[in-house]
Amino acid sequence: MSHDPTARMILARASELVTGDRADDYGDAAESFQRVADLWSPILGVTIQPYQVALCMAQLKISRLLNSPTHGDSWVDAAGYIGLGGQVVPDDVA
């Protein structure tokens, strides 16, 4: 994707990916994030929740953007992770 700084383009592309190609490639977001949480939890020694995986992955993309702020795919991916995180966060999280 060429760099297009408009929010509309970034969010539209993120939506396309999380409901299309990425969903097809990786499966259900809640299940995918749960698998990652199950792998990270013993390494970190704390229980990780699926929505926290989404937050961490968004932070990874943000970290990369600090080095390469014109990399359009990272903006799209960060938006996608935030959207999916909001989708999988349980109602009882304060």
Image: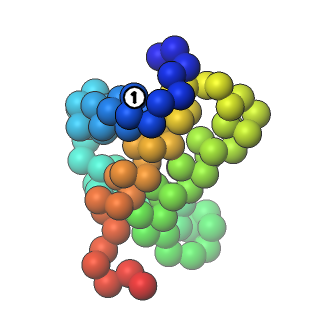
Q: Is residue 48 above or below residue 57?
A: below
Q: Residue at x 33, y 33 (%)?
A: 12
Q: Is residue 85 left or right of residue 70?
A: left
Name the residue nearer the viewer: 1 or 35: 1
Query: Looking at the picture, how far across and down is residue 53, in whole percent?
Result: 48, 58
Number of numbered discs overlaid on the protein picture: 1
Q: Residue at x 73, y 39 (%)?
A: 66
Q: Which quadrant of the rendered structure holds the C terminus?
A: bottom left
Please, which residue is most extreme toward the top here? 2
- Decide if residue 80 is in sight here: yes
Q: Is residue 3 above or below residue 12?
A: above
Q: Is residue 46 left or right of residue 14?
A: right
Query: Looking at the picture, how far across and down is residue 15, in whole percent?
Result: 30, 37
Query: Looking at the picture, how far across and down is residue 55, in whole percent?
Result: 51, 58
Q: Residue at x 53, y 35 (%)?
A: 75
| Figure quadrant of residue 79 | top left
Q: Residue at x 30, y 74 (%)?
A: 90
Q: Amino acid at mark 1?
A: Met
Query: Looking at the picture, how far across and down is residue 82, in whole percent?
Result: 43, 52
Asked which secondary structure carries label 1, the reply is helix
Please, which residue is most extreme toward the right here? 67
How was this image coloured?
rainbow
How many neighbours does mark 1 have within 10 angstroms: few (below 14), some (14-19), or many (20 or more)? few
Name the residue nearer the viewer: 50 or 68: 68
Name the residue nearer the viewer: 2 or 26: 2
- Residue located beneath label 1 in the image: 9
- Decide if residue 22 is in sight here: no
